[in-house]
Image (spheres, helix red, strand yellow):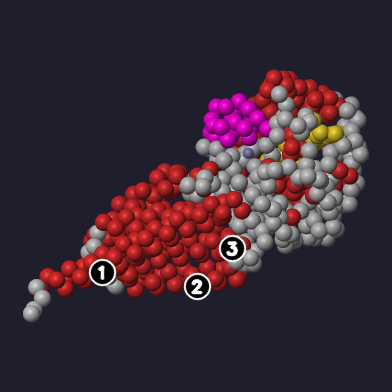
Amino acid sequence: MRLPAHASTRGAGGRDRWLRWGVALGVLLLALGVHHVRRGFIRAFFGDGGAGAAPSLTTGPASRDVDATSRLRIVLVDGLGADHAQTLPHLDRLCRGGLDLRVDTGFPTVSLPVQHALWTGLTQTQTGVMYRIAPLSEPPDASIPARVAGSIAVAESYPEIVHSFGFSRARPSATPMEASAAEAWRTEGFAVAAREAVTSSARLVFIHVLRVDEAGHAHGAASEAYARAADWADAFLDELVRADADAEPHTRWIVLSDHGHRPAGGHGGSEPSIRIVRACVFGHRLPVPVEPTSHALHLVDLSRLVADSLELRPHPESAGRPLETALARPDPGATLPRPGLLRWGVAAVLLLSGIAATGWAARRRWSRLPWWLVVAYLGVVAIHGFPTLSHPMVYPPMGRDMMLGALPGLFVLTWSDLRGYADAPILDRVVGHTALVVALALAASTLCGELGRLVGLTPGPPLMPIWTAQASVLLTFTVVGAGGLAVLLLVRRG
Ligand SMILES: [Zn+2]
């Protein structure tokens, strides 16, 4: 007896459906797995790494030594960008009367690690203290404040940072204050304590102003609140310098910032507007020409100036150079970490494999290409701007802002699936839609060190200018693309 003609197609159709659903489940598991990997990746930013290579800063013929000073006053205005620092009248006047510098604070641009570099003379990469938020349990080796008897630090807030570096005395106490005491410290206590410290006989005094950074996080560098906080810091600086009133100026002042802020708020990345800050040295004379050959130096060079001013030997592994040498050899960007040749090689192989697989699946049909990825990336850039570690969107575990920005990409993915893959085998659909995004995510993860960390080759946090933020975006896109494709596979036959 002959079987009815539709019996075998029904059997084949059933098998196809099971295959399709099985593959959909696999793609969904890929999305969930990548989501999980990305969460671990973000968490790994904040751990310390091992010791890394010293930056290669060029040295030069021995320059004159910097005069030591009996009084060094350092004021750090946290989060004050160089452009904004240019508009502050008191700071500007004081800078013009001394050395007006641009300091490269290195990468990442995060407060505690940047201070770590200032007080040790070692870059963030060298110490592995890269994105540390938690205080240090003891001061780092050869920390400058720990080597100056009677050193004083006064912090407007986040006192755990100054308590990390071994000052003889740091105020306020590191134990959290009651709300009323904290309020009194903010409105009055901080300014009084800072004035007292600056006018004391201590050789090293450090004042950490934080309201500009706080306004930057809450409202952005383009806001009124940020400008108001910066104006307050400017007037406060003038008040401190006047209060010192050292008739015969033995006091050397260094005023600097640790990083700028995005117009909409945020820091951490390596953009010049965030990383390069205004720093000024005035007061007790410095043996450099009034018109130096450049105004640019690295934070480790400024740390060397601090050590020289206090007659301390710099850390033996510090690459910081004497002031005159540093100004003569700016070496732009020399303290930034960069991916090595091996990482570039692996990333290139991964990317080429992704391109080859995509080309195979596209079979010369342009509607099969993963345009969705281009649209998703452009969507994120159009809504949020170019992704860097200064952008708050790259950190949250779900990556919701990036997902919303990528949403138009999902429409393009659906269109491409309907038009380009109307009757295509399931393997073509899966490879065509996902091979490139997976390859790009793997390549960016390789360049920032995440792949090495996952396989136990790289001990440090996966932090690299440009590539860490791109990896965060591309891992999110892999979740979005694979999730979208899983739904398409469930609802539509090839
Ligand atoms: Zn901050």
Question: Is 403 placed left or right of 388 in the picture?
Answer: left
Using the image, determine if residue 12 lies above or below residue 44.
below
Quarter of the image with the C terminus in it: bottom left
Residue beneath the point at 61% across and 46% down: 268
Q: Position of residue 124 (x, y in %)?
A: 70, 53
Location of residue 115 by image quarter: top right
Beta carbon at label 1 within 8 Å of ligand 1: no
Location of residue 125 by image quarter: bottom right
Question: Is 187 placed left or right of 393 in the picture?
Answer: right
Mark 3 element type: helix
Q: Position of residue 137 (x, y in %)?
A: 78, 45
Q: Residues within 10 Å of mark 3 (few under 14, many from 20)?
A: some
Q: Which mark is residue 349?
A: 2
Q: Main secondary structure of the magenta part?
A: helix
Q: Residue furthest front?
A: 1
Mark 1 element type: helix
For the magenta stretch, what is the residue range? 207-230
Q: Which mark is residue 15?
A: 1
**What distance separates the C-alpha of mark 2 from that of mark 1?**
36 Å
The residue type indicated by label 2 comes to: Val
Among numbered discs 2 and 1, the one appearing first in the sequence: 1
